[in-house]
Image (cartoon, helix red, strand yellow):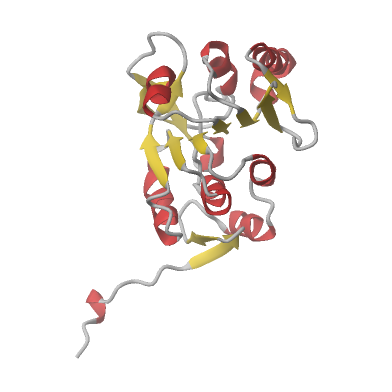
Amino acid sequence: MTNTADAPTETRIVATIHGVQVPQSPHFGPAMVQSITDGRYERGEIETGLSAIPEGARILEMGTGSGIVGAVMALNRKPTAMLSVEANPNLLPQISALYQQNGLQDSITLRHGVVFSQPNPPAMVEFFVAGNFLGSGLFRPEDKKRTAVQVPVIPYDTLKAAFPHDVLMMDIEGAELDFLRHADLSGVTLFLAEFHRDIYGREGMRECRHLLDKAGFVIDDTLSRAGVHVWRRRA
């Protein structure tokens, strides 16, 4: 007689996007699953990444989120190497399960932490986890409930030395401005980011553009989308 209690549980796939199978997760409610199925979930990031990132790149992804965007890039753009950094500890098991489901566990290295580019960063930083993971970040809105957790800080210069990369993609919920203020982007030829003007305003958005221009990048207006911009190193 077969002991059904010992039988492996079959993974339930709730959606497929650009070839990536998305396993069931407590973070995916019905509305989000529908958004993934319809191709609306992080459409800007996915479309710009697929259009702009060349095959064989070395990709650093800051802000893994659900893991879907990075998985789509790894599966379709076939990077030489990819490192993804996520601050929210609650997401790590689901991200790993997503990679495993799609055979990407050897293609993407997942690391827990927050990347800081400033000199002499702290060892740990407070990160605010929202009920909906899309709202988590380093900033806590006064009118919204968040759970504060301590997250390890990864210095960008140390990270870049250990993992040289030519493509940098990020969705870090407003922390991109402070990152750009201090980051040495030498070696990076393609920069893709979702910008959050609602956090740092028009002046902050203008400063982001100035910092990227100063670092030797020019915006690709053809491939950029609303809120998600592609910047290429100036020839």
Q: Quadrant of residue 127?
A: top left
x then y, percent, for residue 229: 70, 31
Q: Which of the image's four quarters has the C terminus?
A: top right
Q: Which of the image's four quarters has the N terminus?
A: bottom left
Q: Quadrant of residue 153?
A: top left
In the depicted structure, whether residue 68 falls above or below residue 116:
below
Residue lying at 62% horizontally and 56% vertically, measured from the top left: 36
> Can residue 126 be seen in the rendering of this structure?
no
* 95 displayed left or right of 214: left
The foreground one among 190 and 228 is: 190
The foreground one among 57 and 64 is: 57
x then y, percent, for residue 164: 44, 28
As drawn, the residue found furthest toward the right would be 222
Residue lying at 79% horizontally and 31% vertically, measured from the top left: 221
* 225 displayed left or right of 177: right
* 48 displayed left or right of 63: right
In the depicted structure, whether residue 150 falls above or below residue 5:
above
The foreground one among 100 and 81 is: 81
x then y, percent, for residue 181: 57, 12
Q: Quadrant of residue 154?
A: top left
* 12 displayed left or right of 168: left
As drawn, the residue found furthest toward the top would be 119
x then y, percent, for residue 232: 68, 27
> Can residue 16 be seen in the rendering of this structure?
yes
Q: How many marks?
A: 0
As drawn, the residue found furthest toward the front would be 235
Residue lying at 69% horizontally and 31% vertically, measured from the top left: 230
